[in-house]
């Protein structure tokens, strides 16, 4: 389909639900979603790190940076100026790692009515609690 920014959140949420469903089914998954910031990777990395899934996270960096080439390869008609912006953000992000992604935390909701106030809390669970949480929130019943 063609790129329409108004459908972006819906498309990303659909992709995330499909990925998490396949992970719960034990299937290997490759996902990108134009992850140009560490926070955009958080939900995927957290699902693998904090639930009893047998998967592991592998980060792959594609070498192509030319926006003209990337625009021709694209399937959704994303404008070249957007692709240039993505490339800049990826370069600014640096090398991703599980620790850096988890430290970045989840993407902020860009809802206009959302608050900018944030409360940071560290919660550390034992294995039984992690499995219980996975069962409750991800539909896994270990």
Image (cartoon, rainbow, N blue to C red):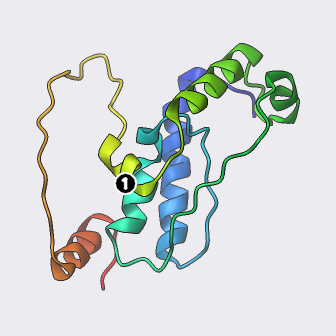
Q: Is residue 135 left or right of residue 43?
A: left
Q: Which quadrant holds residue 81?
A: top right
- Residue closest to the eye, 37 or 71: 37
**Quarter of the figure with the N terminus:** top right
Report the residue at 51% width, 37% height from top. 10
Q: Residue furthest front?
A: 95
Q: Is residue 123 left or right of residue 64?
A: left
Q: Which residue is mark 1?
A: 99
Residue 90, image x, y percentages: 59, 32
Residue 36, image x, y percentages: 55, 34
**Quarter of the figure with the C terminus:** bottom left
Is residue 105 at all visible to an observer of this figure? Answer: no
Q: Residue furthest bottom?
A: 142
Decide: few, some or many residues near mark 1? Use Cα within 10 Å; few <14, some 14-19, many ≥20.
few
Is residue 26 at all visible to an observer of this figure? Answer: yes
Residue 99, image x, y percentages: 37, 54
Q: Is residue 15 left or right of residue 132?
A: right
Q: Which quadrant holds residue 45?
A: bottom left
Q: Is residue 7 left or right of residue 78?
A: left
Q: Is residue 11 above or below residue 86?
A: below
Report the residue at 40% width, 48% height from top. 101
Residue 109, image x, y percentages: 33, 30
Q: Which quadrant holds residue 72?
A: top right
- Looking at the rendered structure, the secondary structure element under dot 1 is helix
């Amino acid at each position: 389909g063609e790129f329409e920014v108004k459908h972006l959140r819906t498309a990303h949420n659909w992709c995330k639900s499909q990925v998490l469903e396949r992970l719960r089914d034990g299937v290997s998954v490759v996902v990108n979603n134009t992850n140009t910031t560490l926070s955009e990777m958080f939900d995927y990395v957290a699902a693998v790190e904090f639930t009893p899934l047998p998967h592991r996270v592998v980060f792959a960096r594609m070498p192509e940076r030319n926006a003209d080439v990337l625009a021709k390869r694209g399937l959704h008609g994303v404008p070249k100026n957007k692709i240039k912006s993505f490339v800049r953000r990826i370069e600014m992000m640096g090398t991703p790692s599980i620790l850096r992604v988890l430290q970045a935390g989840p993407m902020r909701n860009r809802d206009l009515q959302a608050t900018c106030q944030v409360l940071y809390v560290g919660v550390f669970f034992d294995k039984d609690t992690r499995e219980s949480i996975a069962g409750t929130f991800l539909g896994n019943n270990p």
